[in-house]
Amino acid sequence: MSELPDFIIDGPDDAPFTIVLAHGAGAPMDSAYMVAFAKGLAERGLRCVRFEFPYMAQRRVDGKKRPPNRAPVLLETWRAVIDHFGRDNLFIGGKSMGGRIASMIGRTIEDEGQPVAGILCLGYPFYPPGKPEKAPGRLEHLLDIQTPTLILQGTRDTFGGFEHVTKLPLPQTVKLTWLEDGDHGFKPRVKSGRTEPQNWAEAMDALDAFVRSR
């Protein structure tokens, strides 16, 4: 088993569900985005856990930016976290890369017969910006996944906007919720008449409703 990472935990210990969120490729677990979602879910009565992958934890030690660990390391880190908290009433997910890796390990442990309660993806990186033709390579594990999965996506996300993602063959077990005019972090343009806090609050409400509906 991989070494267990450090955790930041918000919300009541006796919450009915635990949500574990991993960070995206470039920002740590205490970025403004991650803090906002962890605190927002805690205020809604859920227990929210954050952790960092090894490459990001190492940045705290030496201050050097480095690329994400290779997929096997990311997946094994997630597995160690899941094994620590147990699968009962456990939802796993995260921002961008963190959510994608969560969905990959979620599918793996589903195939092993010990699935988590659900998967939560905040801005799924369906394809590299400007390359929607690359989407099939990032979807294979989702096409017949049985674990309930929620993907929150900004309508103008360059990693997967409304125009392209709505054409993808996602199964009924994967629910897509759109944040109007949101980018990869759900931030809308001023001219849209919407605000970032508004989109974040809608996303948190959608997460809360999805988790409690399981």
Image (spheres, rainbow, N blue to C red):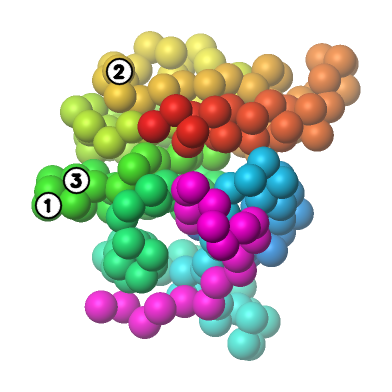
Q: Is residue 14 magenta?
A: yes
The reply to whether callout 2 and callout 3 are in contact (CB within 8 Å) is: no
Q: Is residue 200 above or below residue 181?
A: below
- Residue drawn at x 55%, y 34% as measured from the top left: 207
> Disc 1 residue type?
Glu
Residue on which disc 2 sits: 172
Three-letter code for the amino acid on which mark 3 is drawn: Glu
- The answer to whether marks 3 and 1 mark residues whose Cβ atoms lie closer than 8 Å is yes
Most extreme residue toward the front, as rendered? 14
Q: Is residue 144 magenta?
A: no
Q: Position of residue 62 (x, y in %)?
A: 63, 87
Q: Magenta residues: mostly which secondary structure?
A: loop
Q: Quadrant of the N terminus?
A: bottom left
Closest to the observer: 137 or 202? Answer: 202
* 2, above or below 199, in the image: below
Q: Is residue 149 visible?
A: yes
Q: Position of residue 78 (x, y in %)?
A: 36, 63
> Which amino acid does the dot numbered 2 rest on?
Gln
User: Which residue corresponds to mark 3?
Assistant: 110
Could you tell me how far apart the alpha carbons at marks 3 and 1 are, in whole angstroms?
5 Å
Q: Which residues are magenta?
A: 1-20
163 and 122: which one is in front? Answer: 122
The residue lying toward the viewer, choosing from 136 and 122, is 122
| Disc 2/disc 1 C-alpha distance (Å) | 21 Å
Marked residue nearer the N-terminal end (2 or 1)? 1
- Inspect this view and state whether residue 123 appears: no
Secondary structure, mark 2, is: loop
Reading the image, the residue beneath label 1 is 112
- Dot 2 surroundings within 10 Å: few (below 14), some, or many (20 or more)? few
